[in-house]
Image (cartoon, rainbow, N blue to C red):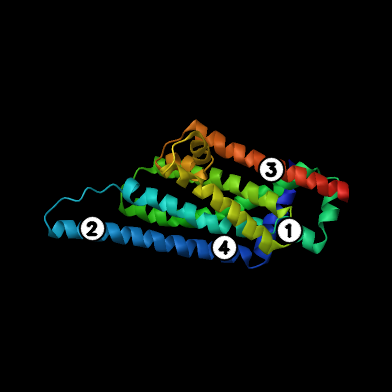
Amino acid sequence: MRNIWVICSKELRSYFVSPIAYLLLVMFAVIFGFFFWNSLGYIVNMTMQAQMEGEPFPMNLNEQVIRPLLSNINVIALFFIPMITMRLFAEEKRSGTIELLATSPVSDWEVIVGKWLAAVLMYALMLLTTVFDFVFMFKYGNPDWKPVVIGYLGLLLQAGGLLAIGTFISTLTRNQIIAGAATFGVCLMLWVLDWVSQFETSTWAQVLSYMSVITHFDSFAKGVLDTKDVIFDVTVIFLGLFFTARSMESLRWRS
């Protein structure tokens, strides 16, 4: 456990040594801030319009604001996750330190989990920038806090799976751009697999729809903690890290 934390700390510091972490944090906060401002502006506009027309406007912050915002975070993460994972192993390969890492007394699983955990913490820091917007909403509104907590849990679990996939892809190349582009492509495919269920109801279509990460995030966004969705995300995390371990094992034998 100590080795995992040492590797995680080293990897997390490497994000902040370069402008990568600051750029990701600022851009994530700015983009989400725009979505937040736009959502509140829409609600305020609809409320004022209803008042002028003398009609009541049923307001539900959880359904009309928070749930769409959680989905917006999901969309933003689709573009940012490849930027977090693309350097994890590709940079080690490019700089030639992957051989030292592969022949070190630290086990493959400690290296993999340490690097993946650093990526998850980096993503968690990005999510932390969105909390301030929700604090503003809770100060001036009265939404239910439980769906927000469950929604953030869903975001972390889903991101954990996609980050594990990105970690695996990063072991396959020494080019960070290729690793980032391939990770984005795979993550996008896992997003759009659900679309096939809109026009096809056969078994293969249902299987593809079940494999979509969006299918398993909808319950979290609604504030529902479903065991099957948690199991799916944990399975994706395990498979991503398992394939990363097999890729690292091949590197160790070649070294």
**Residue at mark 1:** 90
Q: Nearer the viewer, residue 26 or 70?
A: 70
| Dot placed on the residue nearer the N-terminal end, 1 or 4 | 4
Q: Are marks 2 and 1 in contact (CB under 8 Å)?
A: no
**Residue at mark 2:** 46
| Dot placed on the residue nearer the N-terminal end, 3 or 1 | 1
Residue 241's label in the rendered image is 3
Q: Separation of disc 3 and disc 2 at Cα?
A: 47 Å
Q: Are marks 3 and 2 in contact (CB under 8 Å)?
A: no
Q: Separation of disc 3 and disc 4 at Cα?
A: 24 Å
| Dot placed on the residue nearer the N-terminal end, 2 or 1 | 2
Vertical arrangement, residue 246 with respect to residue 133, above or below: above
In the rendered structure, which amino acid carries the disc numbered 3? Leu
Q: Give the image location of residue 85, x and y in percent.
A: 65, 55
Q: Give the image location of residue 188, x and y in percent.
A: 54, 53
Q: Separation of disc 4 and disc 2 at Cα?
A: 33 Å
Determine the residue positioned at 78% across, 47% down.
248
**Mark 4 crowd level (few <14, some 14–19, many ≥20, 10 Å Cα):** many
| Dot placed on the residue nearer the N-terminal end, 3 or 4 | 4
Helix, strand or loop at label 2? It is helix
Determine the residue positioned at 81% across, 44% down.
249
Res 107 seen here: yes
In the rendered structure, which amino acid carries the disc numbered 4? Leu
In the rendered structure, which amino acid carries the disc numbered 2? Met
* Front disc: 1 or 4: 1
Res 3 seen here: no
